[in-house]
Amino acid sequence: MSNLLDPDLEFQDLNLDQLRLITARSGGSVLRRGRALMELGRRASSNTALLQEVADMIRAPENTQLMTIGTTSVSQLGVAGLVAGGSERALTLASELVGEWQGDAQSDFAWLMRSSGITWPLP
């Protein structure tokens, strides 16, 4: 059984530039943009040079306002990618980013993580 934090087979073979392009494409599918940012977050976990770029994408107003499914935003999927990547630096950044959100976005993200089997906020 798969869950949200499993690698997305559609995006695994794409390079960083292709993922950036999908994430930035304003006319494209919002869910696809979120999934691409999630993959970038996952990869940033092991690529410290990419961490700040992904954080900037997550903080971008257009990504915090675009809802993918229900109340899940493109930004929330990006943070989920950082959590899925699992490095200490990525998890610290994920906690910092979630802390910047309003209470309802934080609780929606906590639900998203719990539904994926992750205790949130992290201990």
Image (cartoon, rainbow, N blue to C red):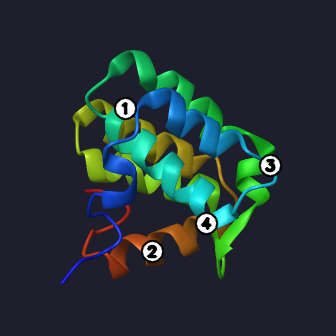
Q: Amino acid at mark 3?
A: Ser
N-term-proximal mark, 4 vs 2: 4
Nearest to viewer (mark 3 / mark 1): 3
The residue beneath circle 3 is 26
In the foreground, 72 or 109 = 72
Quadrant (top left, top right, bottom left, bottom right) of the N terminus? bottom left
Question: Amino acid type of disc 2?
Answer: Leu
Helix, strand or loop at disc 2? helix
Rendered location of residue 44, percent (x, y): 37, 32
| Eye-nearest disc, 3 or 2 | 3
Quadrant for residue 69, please give it: bottom right
Tag 4 near tag 3, CB within 8 Å:
no
Q: Which residue is mark 1?
A: 44
Q: Could you tell me how far apart the alpha carbons at marks 3 and 1 are, in whole angstroms?
A: 22 Å
Label 1, label 2: how many angstroms apart (C-alpha)? 20 Å
| Chain-order first, disc 3 or disc 2 | 3
Q: Classify mark 4: helix, strand or loop.
A: helix
Q: From where the camera sits, is residue 8 visible? A: no
State the residue position of label 2.
Answer: 112
Which residue lies most toward the top here?
49
User: Residue type at mark 1?
Assistant: Ala
Which sits earlier in the primary sequence, circle 1 or circle 2? Answer: 1
Disc 1: CA contacts within 10 A as few (<14), some (14-19) or many (>=20): many
Q: Position of residue 116 (x, y in %)?
A: 31, 75
Q: Amino acid at mark 4?
A: Leu
Q: Which label was assigned to residue 31? A: 4
The crowd level at tag 2 (other Cα within 10 Å; few <14, some 14-19, many 20+) is some
Q: Up-down: is 23 above or below 34? A: above
